[in-house]
Image (cartoon, grey):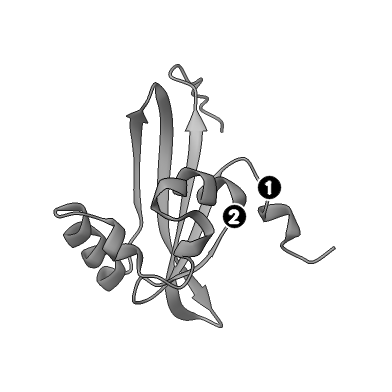
Amino acid sequence: MNDYEWIKEFPAAITVCDQEGFILEMNDKAAKTFETDGGYKLVGSNMLDCHPDPAREKTERLLAAKTKNVYTIEKNGIKKMIYQSPWYKDGWYAGFVELSLEIPFELPHFIRS
């Protein structure tokens, strides 16, 4: 088993891009999520082209600032947490990873010490 084989069928959408926004990898859930835009055919294209303004401008700022962005959305009756964060290779900024996780509308919250 390859070190990252588990990612392919992981039940959250995972999309990885480089510093310019070019999609390097995506898993099955991401390909299904973006199926109407091309699914796996999006690998090699720039994800900025998939975002209309003002989302495109915000994404460009995130890429340039190398800062994470976390929020929730609801679409088609499904609530998701979107977690966008820079990733690094050998200590150098390499791009962004987006995780899109389906979450329940009522989510327990625990405070641990």
Secondary structure beneath label 1? loop
81 versus 51 height, above or below: above
* x then y, percent, for residue 83: 42, 48
Residues under numbered marks 2 and 1 in contact, where contact means CB atoms less than 8 Å apart: yes
Is the residue 104 above or below the residue 70 in the image?
above
Q: Quadrant of residue 78?
A: top left
Q: Residue at x 45, y 16 (%)?
A: 106
Q: Looking at the picture, tell me which residue is in the foreground, 78 or 90.
A: 78
Q: Which residue is disc 1 drawn over?
A: 9
Q: Residue at x 15, y 55 (%)?
A: 53
Residue at (44% x, 48% y) in the render = 34
The answer to whether 16 is drawn above or below residue 27 in the figure is below
Q: Quadrant of the N terminus?
A: bottom right
Quick one: quadrant of the C terminus?
top right
Q: Which mark is residue 27?
A: 2
Q: Amino acid at mark 1?
A: Glu
Relative horizontal placement of residue 57, taking residue 92 as reference (left or right): left
* View extreme (left): residue: 54
The image position of residue 76, as x and y in percent, is 37, 25
